[in-house]
Amino acid sequence: MEPELPKKELDELLFQALRAVYRFERVKMSRFGLSYEGIFLLQHLRRHSKSSMSEIAQEMRSPVSTVTRIVDRLEKKGFISRMRDKKDLRITRLFLEPVGETVVKEIEKHTYQVLMENLKGFDNRDFDCFIKTAMNIGKLLDTTSLP
């Protein structure tokens, strides 16, 4: 069975979800003094250490020049460092520094605390729906097959 939802209702649901994520991320940006992209890059490096600039640019769907500016700001704060790849000097690898690791842990701790506090009002069914949606959000919003 194909799911049915009028476009207007879907548009409103997506806007409300985007609004909630936007506001949630704005709080983190203000609280930790980082841009959304900076937070994302730090969290990415925590999961994928030694990523190259081009790998990060591809992951962020941003030009390398944009990623370079973000990296410059994070490096000035001491959160990350750059190093040339020993096998291919054309490649610059990024590393999360201990202070950057601490910041990422604090960001993720904040996120966890907010979500767990807000999930207290959910019944088991709603909680399960949230988890299922979170697990599938990448599939739901996938645009890789689009031109």
Image: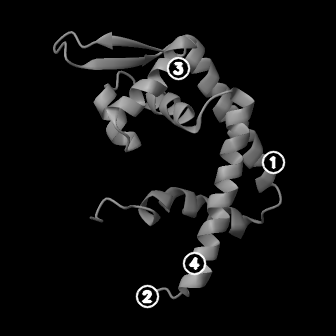
Residue placed under numbered mark 2 in the picture: 2
- Residue type (three-letter) at the residue carrying disc 3: Leu
Q: Is residue 72 above or below residue 123?
A: above
Residue depicted at 24% across the width and 13% down the height: 85
Q: Is residue 138 left or right of residue 34?
A: left
Q: Are marks 4 and 1 in contact (CB under 8 Å)?
A: no
Can residue 128 be seen in the rendering of this structure? no
Residue placed under numbered mark 3 in the picture: 74
Precedes in sequence: disc 3 or disc 4: 4
Label of residue 117 in the image:
1
Precedes in sequence: disc 4 or disc 2: 2
Residue placed under numbered mark 4 in the picture: 10
Precedes in sequence: disc 1 or disc 3: 3
Label of residue 13 in the image:
none
Quadrant placement of the N terminus: bottom left
CA neighbours of label 2 inside 10 A, class few (<14), some (14 to 19), many (20+): few
- Residue type (three-letter) at the residue carrying disc 2: Glu
Q: What's the CA distance linking mark 4 and mark 2?
A: 15 Å
Residue 136: x and y, percent? 48, 61
Most distant residue in the left direction? 87
- Residue type (three-letter) at the residue carrying disc 4: Leu
Q: What's the CA distance linking mark 3 and mark 2?
A: 46 Å
Residue 33: x and y, percent? 68, 27
Q: Secondary structure at mark 4?
A: helix
Q: Is residue 85 left or right of residue 111?
A: left
Q: Secondary structure at mark 1?
A: helix
Q: Secondary structure at mark 3?
A: helix
